[in-house]
Image (cartoon, rainbow, N blue to C red):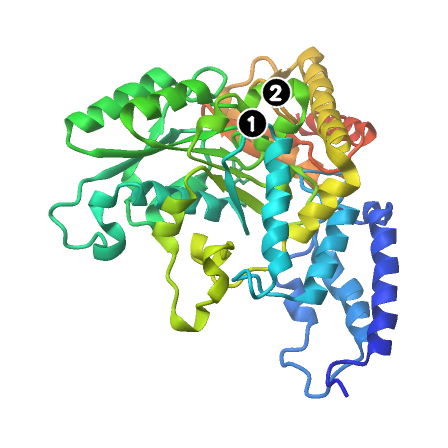
Amino acid sequence: MSRDISADEFRAAAHHLVDWMADYLGGGVEKYPVLSQVEPGALRAALPSAPPVEGEPLQRLLDDAEQLVMPGVTHWNHPGFMAYFGVTGSAPGILGEMLATTLNVNGMLWRTSPAATELEEHALDWLRQLIGLGDGWFGIINDTASISSLLAIAAAREARPELQVRERGLAGRADMPVMRVYTSVQSHSSIDKAAITLGLGHENVVHVPVDDAFRMRTDALESLIAEDRARGYLPLAAVATVGTTSTTSVDPVPEILRICRVNDLWLHVDGAYGGVAGLVPELRHLMDGVDGADSLVVNPHKWLFTPVDCSAFYTRRPEVLKRAFSLVPEYLVTTASDSVTNFMDYGVQLGRRFRALKLWFVIRAFGSDGLAERIRYHCEMAKEFAGWVEAAPDWELMAPTPLSVICFRYAPEGTSEDERDALNAAILERVNASGRVYLSHTKLGGAYTLRVAIGNLRTERRHVAEAWELLRESARSTT
Ligand code: PLP
């Protein structure tokens, strides 16, 4: 007899939960405020301070999740969620996640679940084709883009075997050059964190200035590399971004690639958000040059409707990645290791969840046309919103809108920059307190900037129109 909860009790609770899930996803989510309105500590105060001694029925757990947990949830699956980057736990992705957790396999080696490894290879090969990359890419799923970019920079360092970092480390070595990584001032902080984690030093991340459209300036990149060489530093890698976090600007990858090749730098492309634009024929040009890079990250858990976590990391040089990370103790030796992929060899983690299932389900359930159509719809709504801002007196766009994020602010005539900053911060507070939409902000050229980020499958034109209405109302009552 199983010592788990009985199959009957599980079945009843699971049916109840699935009904709740279908209602929630089918519109029930809109009953909740998108941004949780609780005060810090509210959930902890509502929970018993010690764990239960006697087990509790599953149904009571579910009831408490609804009563106690739900008020503290910010609803990323709400159509009014337009902060940061919108994400979606879509129906097929959720089914894939349910199956993965039921099977609960650990795909560290091919042998520990052949299907987990092979489906990961296959789903990533499909995604590669979908975003318009050629053959010759090796893919692996990580939890986040932060980890994918960390692996990329570790591989860039391993691509210099003469440094012997793997064997000898960095500390106490007079022969170790200063290694430099180049990325734009608009790139994501995960690149800085990767350099910090790898012991390169934060000050060795060189933040290249950008042009008026927030794209890396390649003339500056070239001269910064030359200056570093003249100082005796070792230019190691460049990170270009397709879809930067603040404005979704796209760096000029073809030119960055050329500079990397001339200077012998590893080129990593951060397409965590924007990489999926390659799925849409009229946006595919945003991926120009990416096929020639050494590595790339694209997050299906951002704009490809796959529940968190699912970050696709690709490299053209898997042998270098493997050299950086493979370490096989006796208890993990398997006979088939020459003819199969053991994903533990390509990163830090040993154990790995069966994440490929949800990505495979998402790609199959929507198909390439369906995915492209959904991404296109988000971009169309963003263009329309940008048009409303442009046409409205006292509002201004702060950046171009190449994808599905609009950067803008309220800038009434006669107000100073400081007043505008304060005004826009107050507008944001008010709009978010409404519970109808959730927006976030950034700073561009030092100015407080509002962002509307459209990326959830449930977001329709009426939600975007409501966001605009709330913003204008809030501006009227704030001034
Ligand atoms: N790169 C870019 C361009 C991002 O916008 C983000 C997050 O928004 C990341 C990387 C980090 O993503 P993750 O949370 O998967 O580490």
The outermost residue toward the left is 174
User: Taking 63 as reference, is 299 left or right?
Assistant: left
Which quarter of the image is occupied by the N terminus? bottom right
Tell me the kind of residue under disc 1. Answer: Thr
Vertical comparison of 228 with 70: above or below: above
- Which residue is drawn at the image coordinates 53% and 24% (left, top)? 249
x then y, percent, for residue 340: 51, 55
x then y, percent, for residue 187: 45, 32
Label 2 environment density (alpha carbons within 10 Å; few <14, some 14–19, many ≥20): some
* Residue indicated by mark 1: 248
Camera-side residue of 429 and 171? 171
In this orientation, does residue 35 appear? no
- Which residue is drawn at the image coordinates 62% and 33% (left, top)? 129
x then y, percent, for residue 37: 70, 51
* Residue indicated by mark 2: 401
Give the mark nearest the N terminus, 1 or 2: 1
User: Taking 448 as reference, is 464 left or right?
Assistant: right
Do labels 1 and 2 touch, CB within 8 Å?
Answer: yes
Helix, strand or loop at label 1? It is loop
Tell me the kind of residue under disc 2. Answer: Thr
Which quarter of the image is occupied by the C terminus? top right
- Which residue is drawn at the image coordinates 55% and 26% (left, top)? 247
User: Taking 269 as reference, is 454 left or right?
Assistant: right
Camera-side residue of 31 and 383? 383
Vertical comparison of 111 with 370: above or below: below
